[in-house]
Amino acid sequence: MKIFEAHITHQVSDFLNDHLKKIISIEKANQKMYDASGILHFFDNNEELVSLKEILSATHTIVEEPDRAEYGDFQTNSDLANKVTLHLSSMKVSPEIVIEPTCGKGNFIIASLRNFKNIKNIFGVEIYKPYIWETKFNIVNFFLANPNANKPEISIVHCNVFDYDFKGIAKIHSNKDVLIIGNPPWVTNSKLGSLNSTNLPKKTNFKNHSGLDAMTGKGNFDIAEFITLTMIETFQNMRGNLLLLVKNSVIKNIVFDQNKNLYKITSIEKHCIDSKKEFNVSVEAALFYCQLNSPATFDCIEFDFYNNQTSYLKFGWLNDKFVSNIDIYIHTKEIDGECPFVWRQGLKHDCSTVMELDKVNGYYVNGLNEEVKLEDGLVYGLLKSSDLKNTVINQTRKFTIVTQKKVGQETKYIKTDYPKTYQYLTQHQANFDARKSSIYINKPLFSIFGIGDYSFKPYKVAISGLYKTFHFTLILPQGNKPVMLDDTCYHLGFDNVEFAVYALILLNSDTTVQFLRSVTFADAKRTFTKEVLMRIDLLELGRILDKQYLAKELIKLNEKYRLNISLELWDNFINEMTPIRESQMTLFG
């Protein structure tokens, strides 16, 4: 049965019908409901009281429930909410104030009423009106079924969470034990914006990203992260606890930013749940828990929520380094420094149907299945993340058009030097104009990014940013031309094959693999980023790895891939990586 698009039990429906049918005054109706359920202002206005009485006296019709998953709305089931509050109770958590910033249908509130005996006030905030009613009905139902249960004062408010005055609660109840609990929306600000949602914070670059980072996606943040940080900031000076169900990435970001935020939270824990089982979605999510009003800590212990006896691992800050597994990291921390070579991301053009080509029977074919006639001058072999499976690659399955030697270069030269290519690109100008990223605004025709002198190095060592392979690949020239990589890949470029092979051996060593395992997160959208790869100190790695190991690996590569590389240039390689000042001190020491 539904009323105001909210589920209601027959028990609650009968109760409301019996106790409200003769009441006309909203004040008396609200007092009656306060006495029964502890809910303040059950009715916001007289129209709601009149409408409810009319519906109760009429035949109830079934209303199909809207799908709110696109808004990140994954309602916590009663069983999970109950297990969560029981878990907190077993930790001796006994709040006087319970706050749920996005209370949905109220399952966490009901679970709190069931499992915490000292609650004096409950505050629930929700923007979706049918959920407000369903929460109220569920609370009434709880007290009808449990008439002797503790009955706190309850406020269920129809409001945008970003407009609600949580600071007022913190001020009034500053001396009480608080619990912030709930399941904020699993959605980003840009997603809600595209849905024209009003449940958004004021437009702000709240992490202070640089202009380019903000434009290319880092300015897009998770709504749950914003809500969680708001709750921590607001209530960090109150005695109590916080437990919110969020995506794993949110927890990682909060622990990462704790190094600069210095919030007064400790005992930070991540309790992993099975999102497929609980919500039927393929999202990596967990319960984020911390104690409030405590000396700031900077690491997080990870547990399996269904088996909390032992922890998976501990991640967070160790000294000034952020790591994903502190126990593994300790054994490889000596190579955590700065790579002497600069890792680069591959080409970005956002126009694959035009710019990326296959070769069929000697002809180029684009993503529109058109046969393309081009000069070879601007066409280069291309590798994507899925291609980086072998240890050495000298042939590509795809090709790409490289229109610039560096970012921002004028492209008018193509018309004169490569007329067929220019004609082809011009014919597909609409595809380039349709590119959404603002980085292409006011740039030359057919502009690309991720291009520079480094792109044209003949020898590269590369890794996929997307796959969790911890495997590096040596890329050799194809047809006397350097091979390009797309923007899902990262690479180092070298002028001679010996240096590239030396780097390959170092990067594929067990020491590097274990180090990368300790600083990368398996559920990240990109396992490897430039920031992560730049932490590999190849110079230190080259100094600590045994020379016999290097020679042994070199023999394997030579035999398998018909290379002819020796260690003759090894000292040159080390000198190339050695800072000038250190090199001078060695020379004159």
Image (cartoon, rainbow, N blue to C red):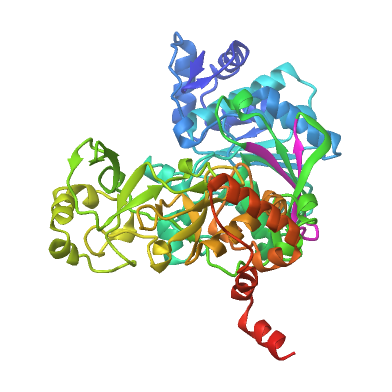
**Location of residue 196 by image quarter:** top left
Q: Quadrant of residue 184?
A: top right
Residue 412 seen: no
| Nearer to the camera, 33 or 515 | 515
Q: Position of residue 284 (x, y in %)?
A: 60, 36
The stretch of residues the image draws in magenta is 285-305
Residue nearest the observer in this picture, 492 or 170: 492
Task: Locate the C terminus by quadrant.
Answer: bottom right
- Residue 292 lies, in percent from the top left, at 76, 52
Residue 308 in view here = yes
Which residue sits at x=29%, y=63%?
404
Q: Is residue 334 above or below residue 105?
A: below
| Residue 158, placed above or below residue 169 | above
Q: Image point 82% across, 40% down: which residue?
A: 93
Asked whether 303 falls inside the magenta stretch, the response is: yes
Given residues 12 and 556, the one toward you in this image is 556
